[in-house]
Image: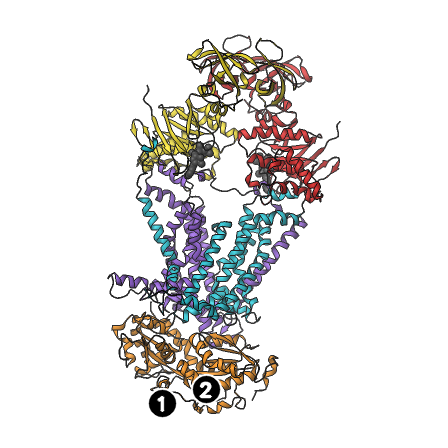
Chain colours: A red, B yellow, C purple, D orange, E cyan
Amino acid sequence: MIESKLSIVDLTKRYAAGLDPAVDRLNMEVEEGHLVALLGPSGCGKTTTLRMVAGLMDPTAGSIVVDGKEITHTPVNKRGMGMVFQSYALFPHMNVEQNVGFGLQMRQVSKSEQQKRVASALDMVQLGHLAKRQPKELSGGQQQRIALARALVVEPTLLLLDEPLSNLDAKLRETMRTEIRSIQQRTRATTLFVTHDQDEALDMADRIAVMNGGLIEQFGSPTEVYERPRTRFVANFIGQANFLKARVVAEMGSAADGEIHYKVDVEGLGQFGAVGAPGMAGSTRELVIRPHRLRVGTEHGATDAIPGIIERISYTGDALSVGVRVADRTLNAQLLTSSGKLPRLGDAAYLSWDAQDAYLLPEAPESSAS
Amino acid sequence: MIESKLSIVDLTKRYAAGLDPAVDRLNMEVEEGHLVALLGPSGCGKTTTLRMVAGLMDPTAGSIVVDGKEITHTPVNKRGMGMVFQSYALFPHMNVEQNVGFGLQMRQVSKSEQQKRVASALDMVQLGHLAKRQPKELSGGQQQRIALARALVVEPTLLLLDEPLSNLDAKLRETMRTEIRSIQQRTRATTLFVTHDQDEALDMADRIAVMNGGLIEQFGSPTEVYERPRTRFVANFIGQANFLKARVVAEMGSAADGEIHYKVDVEGLGQFGAVGAPGMAGSTRELVIRPHRLRVGTEHGATDAIPGIIERISYTGDALSVGVRVADRTLNAQLLTSSGKLPRLGDAAYLSWDAQDAYLLPEAPESSAS
Amino acid sequence: MTTLKEPLQRPRLGAAEGELEQATTKRNRRTYLALLLPGLLGLVVSFVFPLAYMVRMSFNKGAPDGVIEETFTLDTYIQPLTDPYYWRVTLDTFQMGVTVGVLCVIVSYPVALFLARSTSKWRGLLIAIAIAPLLTSAVVRTYGWMVILGTNGLVNSTLADWGLIDTPLKLTNNMTGVTIGLVEIFMPYAILAMISGFGRLSPQLEEAAGSLGASKFKVFTRVTLPLSLPGILTAFLLVFVLSISTFITPRLLGGGSVQVLATEIYDQTTGLLNWPFAAALSVILLVLFGLIIAVYQRLTKKIGG
Amino acid sequence: GCGGGSGSAGTSNSSATSGEINLIAYAGVWQDQYNAAVIEPFKAKYPDIKINYSSKRSSAEMLSALQGQKNDPATDVAIMDNSVSTTGNTQGLFDKIDESAVPNLANVPEKFQDKSGFGPVVMLDAVGLLYDTATFPKAPESWDVLWDPAYAGRINVNAPPSLLGLSLTAITSKMEGEDYTQSIDKAVAKLKEMAPGVQTFAPNPDEYQNVITGQTVLGLGQNARGQFYSDQSNKKMGVTFPKEGTVYQINTVNLVKDAPNKAAAETFINYALSPEAQTAFAKALFYAPSVTNAELPAEVKDRVVPTDGSLNIVPLDVQFLSSARDKWTDTWKRQIITK
Amino acid sequence: MSEARLFKPRFNPAKPAFGILVFLLYLFLLAPLLIVFVVSFASNQYLSFPPEGFTFKWYEMLPEESTFMNGMRISLIVAVIVTVIVLALGVPAALALDRFEFKAKAAVQSFFLSPLLIPSIVLALGMVLLFGPLKLTNTYAGIIIGHIAITIPFVIRTTLMSLATTDTSCEAAARILGANSWTVFRRVTLPIIQPGVIAGGVIAFIVSFDEAVISLFVAESGLPTLPVQVLRYVENSADAAVAALSVILILISLAVVVIVERVMGLRKALR
Ligand SMILES: Nc1ncnc2c1ncn2[C@@H]1O[C@H](COP(=O)(O)OP(=O)(O)OP(=O)(O)O)[C@@H](O)[C@H]1O
Ligand SMILES: Nc1ncnc2c1ncn2[C@@H]1O[C@H](COP(=O)(O)OP(=O)(O)OP(=O)(O)O)[C@@H](O)[C@H]1O
Ligand SMILES: [Mg+2]
Ligand SMILES: [Mg+2]
């Protein structure tokens, strides 16, 4: 096993005695050089976790280990981490250069060395020409890069980013994503990145920790969490999903990556192929199918296609989202607008999918789930 | 021609003598029952237009006609419009019921009639059970629906919405979109809807007015503005686009909807098919191709496929966005993750597209455009 | 209309993220105590001690001509509380406070509304002008009113010149003069209190009411006024409190016939040298104050929310 | 007999001709004139003595200040109304005057000396009627004019505890034929009739300016200041003693008990009783001298209050007044002053 | 061509009427100051109206009027010292109130602001009673202590206001970058809240400089401050020297207000 850069062990934070813990026995191992996204809905404890790692907040229990050394109780100014705040938190009374140099000053780096490192950090974020500006004279994106430079110039053991992109507009956000990712890859700085935006996490992260209610629901690569969600929450939070309650009728053979091919029975719709972890036969599970993995045919082609009626169409430029009514439920499907003839409301539609696109959640379904 | 519900004629607003006009000779015809989105970047004059229609602001010039009657100078309280403000503007000192009933009171509707209509308006937004609540005791989405109910209960001649969704988080925003759209369709209220979110406009509107710098750049159905942008600005603002400067070599015959099939020559890449308005032969134009209309092949299949190298991949759940380097530029393409084998960085890729997916902008290219 | 985009209430930056130090650890407790202590000490010396000493003094016995007998008696309280004269003075004080408060609110409201709404680039200057008088001592402004309201003052001589009056109006040396002076003197306070109390009032709400069919008058009575009520109430309380505790203006403009608790306290101290009695009157004034503020705050909470 | 206790304050660097004196006395025009007529010449004569003048609006305020310093006096000399200084004497705030240190005391007639040897009278004045010379080309002869409805609303009267108000009470009592030491009921009834016509019971800036600026046409005032302001205003205002009589206003000069600079203080008191100081101040502010050897020019002598018995004086007993002041003040407030 | 179609906005009678009302109210508010201004140039010997002529004599009188000059000196000394002390006491307290969480916080905060709600005559009486026996009456110490109580709330308030509107993440950022608590305060917090601190200081200065009641009670005879002198002058004389003095004070105050409004916005400061 690879030696982790950062280990978080049973980290817990309870803000006040009576309250539920904001972070509840959280465990995580982060490899050197990785960018890990903490992803989850508002209030799930992402910021709390990050602040404990930074040392801005004492954990109620648990420990934080960096490079094999426990730092749970090291004061914040001794941890040598770099952090970029959501609001950037540039010092408004210092110019760009002074902002970036602040951390080096605190480390009593010599003047000339300071200058050199500040200059190279500014070059890295391509803002060398703005060294003398005041923060308020910069655009949002530029401020963001300065904050990044300020965090990186001290060569932090860990780089912590708290929703650094949520203040930006859509276009700039996309640019900054690419930028942060490429700077991170150049510096190989191990990074924790808080976000509540799925796309951001999928796009940028090496690993994603999907959090919910103070717990990590799943920790894995973007593809893993997207394609093989461990819980209904994860499936739902990361992209859209159709859920179907299904009884696993029989094993049909093994699929890739140690998964098993099953035959499942969906109430009212019939029997279909699906994949899932071993040992599910006989149980009732939830089947997850992403809307764009649903094939929408206009003719009754495949034998196991489900007949339905197009109930809703919405057009979002790159794709057409359709709601197809089958039996007592509506399934969402997504079509590329280039895929031939466009359907219209009320058209008959035939839904089908590949077995490996229908995934059985390891989690047992709630009784109320449809 | 259909009689318009709302006609805006040469509407102009200049905030102060020296300034450029915020809205500059704007013209628009809105059909009864339509939901029209005013879409454009920040500061393009959307709010200004809406406020003039509402009567909250006097136009500098031009006129506004509703149901054939000019109302340019009718005071706001005599126009009988309904408006939903970005921050909802619920009266904080009245409860939900009183808020919704306010407009009816102003119209001296009888008490019993008021009660009936308030109740049915609240039912329509499915918040009948919250009638006695204070606005501050409601969630953002609920407040929004109350604001909508308040505007709709007076059966307004026009419903005006100023970025009603921009305060909401992503999930709620999507729910509210559907909700507003369905309420609007049920009531058949002619609606003007201000937004700067392309998806929102494409998803909800019957017609989109894409605004820029006080002018309407294009007015048309979602499909029209997306598929057949009139200007580079529109193409770029609505969804992503690849632009290629192309010389139109020859007409190849007529395509659907009165368009012409052309053969075009893209510098350094070769000759391809494209469509556009008649009479372009011989000129230089810009070719717009949406990323998901680019086919990315792994083998040199089609004769006119352009060879390139995969330079960037990013994964956003439903789709894979790849940057393909061809000659001296990078083209963006989007692949569904289900479409077979996934490409890797550095792979060779062969780009091609259908002629009807490459659209020649009617606008002449700027000399600087690549 | 950039104001449209401003959220109605500015969120407390940082606090929501749990930035506040929990003063649970020893080190933190030491820090905040060290920070607080000098200020607390200063206030105890300059505020708590004098008040406490005054309360103690009010239980002493005051003989004529300034002799103080150290004892513990309630006489100093029994006298004012049983004497109808002091009841009248208290009532007059109260009445003056209410009158000044109401009038001050009435004349300040339009100015405050104007300033709260104004988007003009002169707004800063106009606000500065509105509160500049605050920074000029009340003595000077009272002096100005003496010139304006006197028998041969600006008002009377102007009215006489226009032939509107034969005999000068009696505008000074009575409650009228004191009221006019106090209303003006406390206007800046009222304006400031109102502007900051207009938090929930936004032009957008008025526009919303307009778009729902409300006429200008209805917009005012149904939206503007109810929403500015908290500001109005705060301003009223402030002016009330200030006007019943002032004595300079009643002295200078009252001509000896305006007797309120504050002038009574002043007379008892400097004229009659009855310190314990003055102290007792002060305590009574304080208690009155406390009661009114308590009642009022309960009231405001109900209305303001 | 206890004149030897001067060392207690410990400021021994003061002698009869050097050091400093802390004087407490009236403010305003009195201060200006006293400074010019007495203090400056004194300083010229004794260049090593510095005088710190602390001014008060009224004798009561002086008393209050002295009471405050009782245990550690910071004042040496006080010039104040004799009704108040008597209170001070009984409260033990003042010291007796040693005739050997203040030789000029000998020139003060018996009637102006304190019977127990405390501070003597230093100047005299009396209550007068102020009038606007435009309205009254001839000075009014009787206090009755205050009740004349023709002038209602244009009268200023200083209510007690001001000495002017106390004096008016005594005068009215006498006019109504009652003994004010027994009862003032009739006076109160009479004054109540006057009250509605009174423009102000606490004239501001003061009683004289009120008449001069035309705010009122009649007022109660001190003769001395009235004379002074009459000149200042080019005779826009006059002051007169009505025939029913008036009340003296007498100022005494007092040595504070345990005064820190007793020796210098005695030098000053001696100077204050000197003929040159008395004459100079009479010329400056029209106070009548209290010493027998002060010679006044005729035009000044005419305008200061006569001390030779030629004026009808309502005696106001000082001891009585100090006990009645609070009561009369209260009576005015409760019964006479109306809104 | 669009210019040809420009038209004037409709005439709205409500707007000018409201404007006139506001103008009249401003006139009322400023009336005493305006009149003082006029009177200060009037040659009338005594306070009266209308002015009889134009003169500078009242201004020329001022430098000679030793009571004013003396009062000005005392007031300045007091105000400067009060400002310094009150900033030293108030800023740390505000910091503790804003940046720390502790039990009695709300109570402590209202305690710090409570002197504003106590009638100043009551406070003044208490002070003179207490300071008499302690020999603090008529001393600088006495007035200064007296003024601390009434100025501290302003400093706390303005400082709290600017603390509340600053993003604490700047401080967190500095700490992460390796700064200790003192460095954070000196290099980050203080510079950021500087406008509030300055505004608080200026207000404390003006309040102390203009304060009449406490000064009157505590130090009338020994160290009469300018407002006390002015009060006395107004009570004793009817000439316009005080008007001239007031005009000068008004102009100074106005300049200060405009500057402070520029720096941070007095509205927030004086709430
Ligand atoms: N100072 C505090 N006191 C009490 N509870 C707090 C405090 N700060 C945060 N919480 C609670 O702790 C939980 C986690 O908060 P946290 O700020 O970590 O959420 P988050 O995941 O960062 O959310 P967001 O996406 O909204 O920033 C929330 O329920 C929040 O209400
Ligand atoms: N009161 C005003 N005075 C002067 N210029 C104004 C005023 N209000 C708006 N503008 C200007 O008019 C232009 C259009 O403003 P408008 O509010 O209509 O934009 P918008 O399209 O609604 O933008 P956003 O998406 O940011 O709300 C902008 O350039 C803006 O700066
Ligand atoms: Mg967070
Ligand atoms: Mg807008």
Mark 1 falls on what kind of element? Answer: loop
Q: Disc 1 to disc 2, how far (Cα)?
A: 24 Å
Q: Is residue E162 left or right of residue D285?
A: right
Q: Which mark is residue D309?
A: 1
Front-lying residue, B198 or B200? B198
Q: Is residue B348 left or right of residue A329?
A: right
Residue B87 visible in the picture: no
What residue would you read off at disc 2? D276
- Badge 2 crowding class, 10 Å Cα cut-off, few under 14, some 14 to 19, many 20 or more, is some
Front-lying residue, D80 or A331? D80
Residue B291 visible in the picture: yes
Report the residue at 56% width, 22% height from top: A241
Task: Between label 1 and label 2, give the one nearer the viewer.
Answer: 2
Q: Is the residue at mark 1 in contact range of ligand 2, meaning its CB lies under 8 Å from it?
A: no
The quadrant the N terminus of chain C occupies is top left
**Mark 1, chain letter?**
D
Q: The disc labelled 2 sits on which kind of residue?
A: Glu
- Badge 1 crowding class, 10 Å Cα cut-off, few under 14, some 14 to 19, many 20 or more, is few
Q: Position of residue A107 (x, y in %)?
A: 71, 43
Proximity of marks 1 and 2: CB atoms separated by less than 8 Å: no
Q: Position of residue A263 (x, y in %)?
A: 62, 13
Residues flagged by tags 1 and 2 on a common chain: yes
Q: Which mark is residue E224?
A: none
Front-lying residue, B26 or D143? B26
Q: Is residue A209 left or right of residue D266?
A: right
Quadrant hosting ligand 1 = top right
Front-lying residue, B326 or A321? B326
Q: The disc labelled 1 sits on which kind of residue?
A: Gly
Mark 2 falls on what kind of element? Answer: helix
Q: Position of residue C249 (x, y in %)?
A: 40, 64
